[in-house]
Image (cartoon, rainbow, N blue to C red):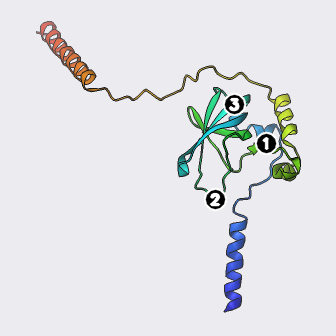
Amino acid sequence: MKQTLFIILLILSCKVSIACQCPLSTLDQKELQKYEIIFKGKIKSIKLDKEKSEAIFIVSELYKGMLADDFKIIFNDADVCKLELRVGDEWIIYTNYFQVDNAKLDFCSRSRKYIKNIKEDFFAETTGITYDEELRYLQENLGLHKLMKNNPNVVENRNIIPNNNQFIIVLICSMLGLIAFYWLFNKLFK
């Protein structure tokens, strides 16, 4: 009985321990084609909301995609496998668009944080390429792209509900338009 319980606990602990592993990938053109957006930036602010958490990045170098200076990344903070994002951290972000003006961060993307001490950089140890070498590769193979001055896709104020005065004015104009249409229709088709 003890052996069976021990084996079950061992199997369950093994499943939990390997749950956050991602397949290793090499940095090449094929890998870069998987992503619509690649940039280097610092985290300006973070808003935690479980599955709909947001991080605003100040983009310093854009390698792929069309972004403004500030770009919103959506991530799942409730997930066991998540990247630890903190305000002020510098990252290389590899991601794909989620909506028109933001992207979703995936744990298994190549996204990586800048770590000053190279000996503590786990990503460099597993992939064999340092943060600086990866930046050089991106600059040489993708080049630097210009950031957009103003993001034309901002959707902040498109669905504002009118106040009472605006509603009455629109209602009166609509009614006058219907009356004019009815009058013209009856006058022309009698």
Q: Secondary structure at mark 1?
A: loop
Q: Residue at x 76, y 44 (%)?
A: 113
Residue 43 in the image: state x and y as whole percent: 67, 38
Residue at screen point 59% across, 52% down? 77
* Residue 34 visible in the shown view: no
- Across and down, in percent, residue 11 comes to 70, 76
Q: Is residue 156 left or right of residue 7?
A: left
Q: Residue furthest bottom?
A: 1
Q: Residue furthest front?
A: 88
| Mark 2 or 3, nearer chain start | 3
- Residue name at image x 25 percent, y 22 percent: 165
Which label number is shown at residue 59?
3
Vertically, is 38 above or below 106?
Answer: above
- In-front residue for pair 47/2: 47
Q: Secondary structure beneath disc 3?
A: strand
Task: Point out the tag, 2 or 1, that comes first from the N-terminus.
Answer: 2
Q: Is 52 on the left or on the right of 189, as rendered?
A: right
Q: Which mark is residue 114?
A: 1
Q: Quadrant of the C terminus?
A: top left
Label ID, residue 80:
2
Residue type (three-letter) at the residue carrying disc 2: Val
Cα distance, mark 2 to mark 3?
27 Å
Q: Residue furthest left?
A: 190
Name which quarter of the figure residue 102 lies in: top right
Name the element at disc 2: loop
Local crowd size for mark 1, using a 10 Å CA cut-off: few (<14), some (14–19), many (≥20): some
The amino acid type found where label 3 is placed reads Val
- Name the image quarter holding the N terminus: bottom right
Residue type pointed to by label 1: Tyr
Cβ atoms at labels 2 and 3 below 8 Å apart: no
Residue 99, by quadrant, is top right
Query: Viewer-proximal residue, 164 or 154?
Result: 164
